[in-house]
Image (cartoon, rainbow, N blue to C red):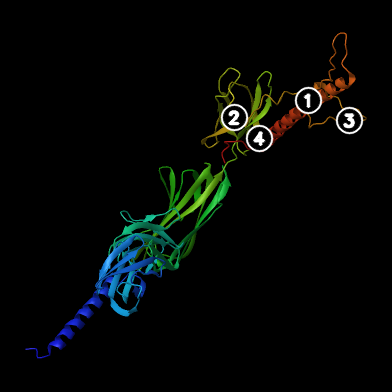
Amino acid sequence: MDKRPAGGKRLTILLAAVVVFLLLVSTSMAGSPKIFGGKVISGSRYVTQTGEEFSVAAVPPYDRVALELPWDSFVMENKSCSEGKLFRGCYNGASFSGYNYSLTDRLVYELDIEVYALVPEITLTMLTSKTAIDVGERATVYVNITNTGTKKGMAYFTTLIPKGLKLAELPDQPCALSSEGTLSMAAELDDGLMKRCIYEVIGGEPGEYSITAAAEFDALKREKAGSSASLTVKRLPFSISAEYPRQLPLGEQFNLSFNLSSESELSPLLLNALIPKQIKLVSADKEAELKYDNRDAKLSYGGQFTKFNGTITLKIIAEANTAGDFFITGNTTWKYGDLWQQLEAAFPINITFARPYIRLSTYDNKTGVASIDVVNPSHLSISNVSITSGTFSGPAGNGLHTDIVPSQSHTSFYITPSRLERGNLTGLLEYQTPYGQMLSAIFQLPLNASLLDFTPKPAQQKPAQNESMPDFNQSQTGKNDADNQQAPVILESPGRGIPKKFAAAIAAVTLVVAAVFLLARVKREKEALSEIKEGEKLLSEGFYPGKPG
């Protein structure tokens, strides 16, 4: 039987209730930032630490308090907490402060309250499946994004992969690969909810790397969190490199050398180098075995019983017989200790070809007959050259064709424009290289029949020494502007002449009008001539709209 006095029992119960209340308050407030705490007076207005203005109103006998905040309001019982949509408040009791005789009851009480913001709080953890990998090996990265706050919110997550590592995106993940090459996520997280992103990284270059991640909530208190994980990419015991010209013209032979090197004994070792069919293999070293797979040449070295240690160079001679960008690949597999390893390498090569182009030679805007040239600037001849167009035709209305255009030469065709699209001759040029590769290009030639006459003119006599040279900035229509000018006209009526002052005025006005029209005409013709000369310059240099690079 408890022999403590009744007062002691009540005190114990009261203390226990206070402890339970404090525990509940501390538990519920974990993760919610406190934005106000102190004593207030009923009817007055106050401001929180985050700038929200609020007011309180006590309900006699001060056992309840109403809290009003922007977009939120609720009632708190004495010695308890309540929450609304955005905020949470606690009422810890009232104390007598003094008298105010302007009030009805004259008694003034101070109310002890606390205000918290209901916001999400983010926790970020990162873990890798391995702390060290080899070049080409994969490691899995796990990232947990958890809302440990008291309210749901929109979470934004990003992770940055160092350049020495390659990112491998896994399917069915909330994180997606962005255009900037990073993983990102935007998702709404309820309080207590977790999102997990799982992805893989591949060792690209030896070194020490730090994978970093960051997340934040878009809320009243913008919570941010970060995490990182370390990963070591070990140096492989084997390396492969290639020596060859990265760019060369079509038809040229070149030397290609594979350099193999190892600091330890590898057994076995097998190298398979694939030479694309666009490159013709001429010869190879005896140490290498040559096979063909769908016209692709496969160069092999080593095998099941090969022990490799040190360096070796494999040399081949090849010929570039197709224009374009290609890759020579090498795949090497070996066993180092008890571990099988593999290394893939790709070596780019660009085979260039000086593409033929079309240029306008002459054009007669009276007869509509034009002469165009197919120019071949390459060191190789082209064959089966044909031109098709909907804007012009050949002499018999058919397409234009020639068997061959020699290297660094041209062939001319006479055409008749049938339809002009914005003053341009357009068409398709098709041709074949000496290695059987068919190529094509769309061309477009500027043509302005109304302003320019490309008809050859007879040679003019050389002007005498005392004669002035013609002004080539004037109109090139074959006539001097002076021939096109009209003399002032003086109007007279039978039996009565116009007074001299009026005749002079009319003559002056006529001269001004003629000069204005003449200047406008010269300006238009100068602009047209400038555009045509610029077009001829571009055409002579081999540039034209639609020309392939």
Mark 1 residue type:
Val
Q: Which residue is mark 2?
A: 404
Badge 1 density bin: few <14, some 14–19, many ≥20, Cα 10 Å: few
Instruction: Please provide percent x and percent y for residue 98.
Output: 34, 80
- For the point 66% across and 37% down, which residue is it? 538
Ranked by sequence position, the earlier of labels 2 and 4 is 2
Distance, label 1 to label 3, CA atoms, is 28 Å
Q: Which residue is mark 1?
A: 513
Q: Are marks 4 and 3 in contact (CB under 8 Å)?
A: no
- Farthest-out residue, top: 495
Question: Can you identify the residue that label 4 sits on?
Answer: 539
Q: Nearer the viewer, residue 478 or 348?
A: 478
Mark 1 or 3, nearer chain start: 3
Q: Which residue is tagged 3?
A: 468
Label 2 sits on a secondary structure element that is strand
Q: Give the label, 2 or 1, closer to the camera.
A: 1
* Foreground label between 4 and 3: 3
